[in-house]
Image: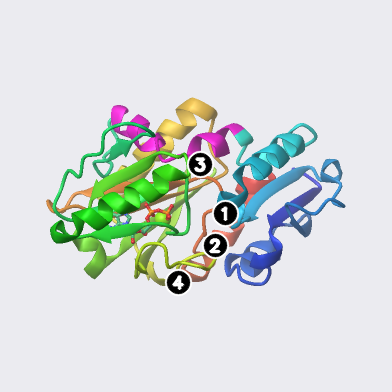
Amino acid sequence: MIGSLAWVTTAAARGTDEDEPLALAGTGVRVEVVDWDDPDVRWESFDRVVLRSTWDYPQRLDEFLGWLDRVEAVTEVRNPAAVVRWNLDKHYLAELADAGVPVIPTTFVEPGGPVALAADDVVVKPAVGAGSRDVGAYRAVEHDLALDHVERLRARGGSVLVQPKVASVEAEGEWGLLFFGGRFSHAANKRITLAPAGEVGDLYVAEELFAHEADAAQVAAARAAVDVVAARFGTPAYARVDLVRDDDGRHRVLELELVEPSLFLPQADAGAAARLAAALVS
Ligand SMILES: Nc1ncnc2c1ncn2[C@@H]1O[C@H](COP(=O)(O)OP(=O)(O)O)[C@@H](O)[C@H]1O
Ligand SMILES: [Mg+2]
């Protein structure tokens, strides 16, 4: 058990994290909400540093990773920097696929490499990104626009992911399954309306969330992804696995969130915050 915890946010996200009040109510330790880029914070004065609403990190990645390493040199970070680095780049989907986890088929377009649009309806997204920023969906007649999007993202120097657009997402959305301390906690159904690519100016795209009781197939698919992380890095304090249903009705991993996932506590049962707290302070 620890004595103090830093709950890390960023100035622009203050007051917008709906998990925060629920999560902080029950930790049982001294908690301070701090901005990751605040130069006055003495990180070594906390027993644990928990990455939460650090939602501007994709735009300030080098700065953020440098900060993370400095903090980890003086105290314990959840999730650890090695996990964060691995999870920042959606190339981890290839590793999950290699380990037998059902993931959305993904083509990685590397800087300088060839581009293939492997389906009529495609989604283009940056390998390093979050909050649906720079994610675009295109129909077959819009492939020229999809290729423009790929080149725009590549011009920034990063890799790009191209996936078949999963048809069910528009009607059903996706399901986020939360694991605290490696144990399944709860799930929520998430609906997102993607803006035309490049038009997202905010920190994140608005999401609609609904409580959801995960079924055994969903938990199994999500757990497979968490197990890969646990085998490689040790059990993550928190993990969210986002699933979608493919055309065959099978649940596949769209994304694995180990950095600063929304935890869907407002949609969860009353015990979820306590399960989170236990995982964070143990
Ligand atoms: N292959 C896909 N098929 C259908 N919708 C997708 C696909 N990939 C992404 N999306 C939509 O775009 C959103 C953001 O993509 P995601 O992979 O979750 O990246 P981010 O890290 O930005 O959250 C998803 O929540 C989903 O609504
Ligand atoms: Mg997502």
Identify residue for label 4: 206
* Disc number lying in front (4 or 1): 4
Near-viewer residue (212 or 140):
140
On-image quarter of the N terminus: top right
Examine the rendered structure and indicate whether residue 234 appears above or below residue 104: above
Whether residue 146 is in magenta: the answer is no
Type of amino acid under label 3: Leu
- Residue at 32%, 46% (x, y): give it: 253
Residue 16 image point, x, y percent: 61, 71
The reply to whether discs 2 and 1 touch (Cβ–Cβ < 8 Å) is yes
- Find the magenta span and give its range: 82-99
**Marks 2/1: CA distance?**
6 Å
Q: Earlier in the sequence, mark 2 or mark 4?
A: 4
Q: Secondary structure at mark 4?
A: loop
Identify residue for label 1: 275
**Marks 3/4: CA distance?**
21 Å
**Is the CB of the residue bearing disc 1 within 8 angstroms of ligand 2?**
no
Q: Which mark is residue 271?
A: 2
Residue 111 image point, x, y percent: 39, 34
**Is the CB of the residue bearing disc 4 within 8 angstroms of ligand 1?**
no
Type of amino acid under label 2: Gly
The reply to whether discs 3 and 2 touch (Cβ–Cβ < 8 Å) is no
Q: Quadrant of ligand 1?
A: bottom left
